[in-house]
Image (spheres, rainbow, N blue to C red):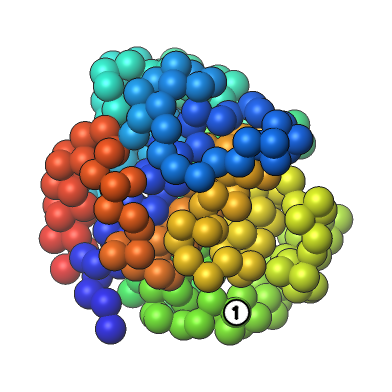
Amino acid sequence: MKTLLENIRGGILGVAVGDALGVPYEFLDRDQMDKKPAKDMIGYGTHNQPEGTWSDDSSLTFCLMESLCKGYDLFDIASKFCAWFYENLWTPRGLVFDIGITTKDALYQFKRGMTPDLCGGLDEYSNGNGSLMRILPLVYYLKDESDINIRYDIIKKVSSITHGHLRSVFSCFIYVEYALLLLQNRDKFEAFEVIKRPILDFAIQNDFNPKEITLFSRILEEDISKQNRFDIQGSGYVLKSLEAAFWCLLTSTSYEESVLKAINLGEDTDTTAAITGGLSGLYYGYESIPETWKFQLARFDDIEGLIERFNKSLL
């Protein structure tokens, strides 16, 4: 049985390592990745950053953790996000080099005085993966919360700081509910089956738009692991990111295999690998992440310090 600290280290380092592995390949398509697949941590590439450099995915994950160390305060979370973008808080090398349009717009609205959970885009076209990529810390914060309604409300509000549409919120909800079972040391296939019915029932009880919920059928009603690789996309669209994360985890047998598989889908390589890496690191554990990858991470000691502070705040 892993300790809470070990579970936090596995999941959070899983996000950051997956992110850093994918940064050099961002925007390359699948054909390009198939010709020269990702195999190891490299530098430069798309964003011209040294090896071990993580992106906004990890930065915002760390900001959320930093805020949760003091308890749940939506205004403080949004303030930390703004401090990242405007003041370079939790950047790997002192500079923001990547941000999604929806996230940028939302942080601007918050800075102008809007209520945090009303800042995120609400239209159908504001469904990038920008809240899903940073949601993992809520798994640890909500580990002892038995009321699904409270869990959903917190996940919804934290997502809605940048992404308020039901599709984004529901994606985060599914991800967290699944990860909570992994935190309980459940088998990854068993956990995937266990979450389906309660989540569908919850959606019905809360009168969620049936057309929206139907979009999640490949996750909640089918077996995503049986999908062909060419039917899985590494795009920045939140639903496809969620499908890809489940597929990469369920069709792999190690952390390393799952995140490389995520990157080699092409497109939004860093985020697909970060989202996959969070689940995979939580499931397989900190020790499963190759040491050379972990220790190449920018600000590794700072990340470890944050993980320890976060763990203490939850005890």
Q: Quadrant of the N terminus?
A: bottom left
From the top left corner, tell me how far across and down residue 289 is, in percent: 35, 58
Tell me if 175 is positioned left or right of 278 in this view: right
Q: Is residue 93 above or below residue 277?
A: above
State the residue in front, 116 or 181: 181
In the rendered structure, the answer to whether residue 54 lies left or right of residue 311 reads right
Q: Residues within 10 Å of mark 1 (few under 14, many from 20)?
A: few
x 76%, y 56%: residue = 229
| Residue at image point 61% right, 41% down | 37
View extreme (front): residue: 35
- Let me know if residue 278 appears in the view: yes
* Whether residue 60 can be seen here: no
* Type of amino acid under label 1: Phe
Q: Which residue is mark 1?
A: 189
Residue 272 in the image, given as x and y percentages of width and height: 57, 45
- Numbered marks: total: 1
Q: Nearer the viewer, residue 202 or 276?
A: 276
* SS state under label 1: helix
Residue 116: percent from left, percent from top: 45, 34
Nearer to us in this view, 279 or 41: 41
Tell me which corner region of the image, top left, top right, bottom left or bottom right, holds residue 58: top left
Q: In the image, is 149 to the left or to the right of 49?
A: right
- Give the quadrant of the C terminus: bottom left
The x, y position of residue 235, in whole percent, is: 69, 38
